[in-house]
Image (cartoon, rainbow, N blue to C red):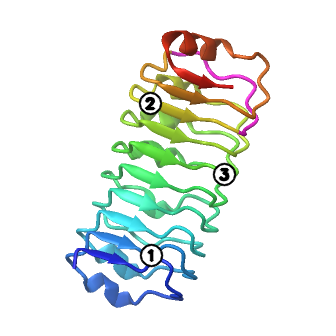
């Protein structure tokens, strides 16, 4: 078995024996009453996709190091689980609506990341280490409490889509934003409309929403 979907099942727990499904590559266990995951998930060495969004998880056990796609959104986690650290092959991380108050500095270690979704959390700042995500193409930060962005975001060489809607931003950092194609700044408290950096991006052809 390479793919297993248990989406929407009234599961209260997953058996520890799930770790015996050694050929499993994709596991979907979203929209259930699950409050915990078995440690056996860490033994699924071929697992590439894990969807455990829309559950009741407060913690996450060790994860397979080859994981590429991880959905954690809409769980009462309160923080980005340490189990995510070291997932060097991760290209997609979804952790929206998870009560996250800060991103840890080790977020910059996820160097394969192409898309990061942490919208509707409680973020007030971002670590400068976000600037180490040199492959990142999409960064979704809508609905947090960000008062400013680190200058490192403006330097991300492949960032194409930056969603900053509904934060507390008064401006954005100057910088090249070398690959940016879409910037969404709606529902912020911008001091200048548009901010100088956004005006320059619009002149360059970037789709800027204010």
Disc 3 marks which residue? 120
Q: Say if mark 2 contacts mark 1, CB within 8 Å.
A: no
Q: Residue at x 61, y 49 (%)?
A: 119
Residue 131's x, y, as percent?
47, 32
Disc 1 marks which residue? 29
> Which quadrant does the C terminus fall into?
top right
Estimate how packed mark 3 is, as few (under 14), some (14 to 19) or many (20 or more) residues with alpha carbons within 10 Å: many
Q: Is residue 119 above or below residue 190?
A: below
Image quadrant in which you'd find residue 46? bottom left
Which residue occupies the foreground of this view, 11 or 111?
A: 11
> Which is nearer the N-term, disc 2 or disc 3?
3
What is the secondary structure assignment of the residue under circle 1?
loop
- In the image, 17: left or right of 122? left
> Which is nearer the N-term, disc 2 or disc 1?
1
What's the magenta region? 166-175
- In the image, 150: left or right of 89? right
Residue 9's x, y, as percent?
49, 84
What is the secondary structure assignment of the residue under circle 2?
loop
Disc 2 marks which residue? 159
Residue 177's x, y, as percent?
49, 20
Which residue occupies the foreground of this view, 54 or 59?
A: 54
Q: Residue at x 52, y 62 (%)?
A: 81
Gap between marks 1 and 3 measured at Cα: 22 Å
Gap between marks 2 and 3 measured at Cα: 20 Å
Image quadrant in which you'd find residue 56? bottom right
- In the image, 146: left or right of 2? right
Gap between marks 2 and 1 measured at Cα: 30 Å
Image quadrant in which you'd find residue 59? bottom right
Q: Residue at x 59, y 72 (%)?
A: 58
């Amino acid at each position: 078995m390479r793919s297993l979907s248990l989406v929407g099942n009234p599961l209260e727990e997953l058996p520890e024996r799930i770790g015996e499904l050694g050929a499993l590559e994709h596991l979907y266990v979203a929209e259930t009453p699950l409050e915990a995951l078995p440690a056996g998930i860490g033994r699924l060495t071929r697992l590439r996709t894990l969807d455990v969004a829309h559950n009741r998880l407060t913690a996450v056990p060790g994860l397979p190091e080859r994981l590429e796609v991880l959905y954690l959104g809409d769980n009462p986690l309160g923080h980005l689980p340490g189990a995510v650290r070291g997932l060097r092959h991760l290209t997609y991380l979804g952790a929206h609506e998870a009560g996250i108050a800060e991103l840890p500095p080790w977020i910059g270690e996820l160097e394969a990341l192409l898309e990061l979704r942490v919208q509707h959390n409680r973020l007030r700042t971002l670590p400068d280490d976000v600037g180490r995500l040199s492959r990142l193409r999409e960064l979704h930060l809508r609905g947090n409490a960000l008062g400013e962005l680190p200058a490192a975001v403006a330097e991300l060489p492949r960032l194409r889509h930056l969603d900053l809607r509904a934060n507390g931003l008064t401006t954005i950092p100057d910088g090249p934003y070398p690959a940016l194609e879409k910037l969404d700044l709606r529902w912020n408290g911008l001091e200048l409309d548009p901010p100088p950096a956004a005006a320059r991006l619009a002149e360059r052809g970037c789709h800027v929403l204010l």
